Amino acid sequence: MELGIVGDVRDALERLVERLSPRTLPSVADDLARYRALDEQQLLEQAGPLLDRKGPGIHPALALGVVGAVFGSDAFYTVDGGSTALWAYAVLPPTQPSSYHSILELGMLGTGIPSAIGSKLGAPERDVVCVTGDGAAGFNIMEMQTAARERLAITTVVMAEGSWTLEEVNELDLYGQTFGTDQGDIRWDIVAQGLGCHGEFVERMEDLEPALRRAKDHARPSLVCVRSDHEANLSIPTAITSRFFEVYSGPNEPADETTTPL
């Protein structure tokens, strides 16, 4: 049932407040605590299989967990890439308002580093972290030189499995083969060093946290190149991919608990 009301905004709102004031409304604080508990439960359910993983290489989700632990909830996060954006959506910690800038809802690539620069210019006192896939990093990697020139202490973390991983699944589904997806081994840290930034290369999980802390404490822009595992990056839980399809195709039916490629 709908009711159209024509009236002065101030007068109408004041009268609505008068009518609603005697009512007992749910506590916002109680609701917030309940939703946070549900969110934490969902994250733990998704993280279970990842935490038990014994395979070789660095799982991007586990790497992003370390990023979140090092930089915390007070940082700005700018997220770029395909699979990387999906893992980040599920793993990075909740932030302050207007502090999580992701391409997920918009669908473009390459804005992560420029967004990090803009965030640092807008809030120079806060940590700013760009998390990006290697394909997306290639669009605007030269902006790391802008960050160096402007002496902006941002940290860029590149998940470098050496492939346009998200495109592999699409191409296999549509054409039965892949083409143009293999990037090879690119040392994004060396590229960053050539642009005047601090660079770190990480191949083992135990080396990631120290590298991130050095980048965090560096007075100039830094880039950490993480050699993430290609096969791990291909297998994203259905609960996470549902978010992707919901954004682009509308709400989905509840996902089952199986793990499937995107």
Image (spheres, grey):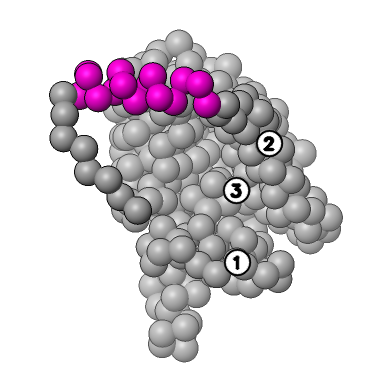
Q: Quadrant of residue 31?
A: top right
Label 1: which residue?
Answer: 254
Crowdedness of circle 3 by 10 Å Cα count: few (<14), some, many (20+)?
Answer: many
Q: Quadrant of residue 117?
A: top left
**Does 103 appear in magenta?**
no
Q: Observer-nearest residue: 221 or 88? A: 88
Question: 88 above or below 209?
Answer: below
If you read the primary sequence from the N terminus, does the residue marked by circle 1 or circle 3 appear first?
Answer: 3
Q: Amino acid at mark 1?
A: Pro
Q: Observer-nearest residue: 27 or 66? A: 27
User: In this rendering, does residue 65 appear at all?
Assistant: no
Residue 161 appears left or right of 202: left
Residue that extends furthest to the top in the rendered view of this protein? 125
Residue 160 appears left or right of 16: right
SS of the residue at dot 2? helix
The reply to whether dot 1 and dot 2 touch (C-beta < 8 Å) is: no
User: In this rendering, does residue 175 appear at all?
Assistant: yes
Q: Observer-nearest residue: 196 or 153? A: 153
The secondary structure that most of the magenta stretch takes on is helix
Q: Observer-nearest residue: 260 or 211? A: 260
The reply to whether dot 3 and dot 2 touch (C-beta < 8 Å) is: no
Nearer to us of marks 3 and 2 is 2
Residue 134 appears left or right of 91: left
Residue 34 numbered mark, or none = 2
Q: Amino acid at mark 2?
A: Arg
Q: Quadrant of residue 149?
A: top left
Q: Which residues are magenta?
A: 9-23
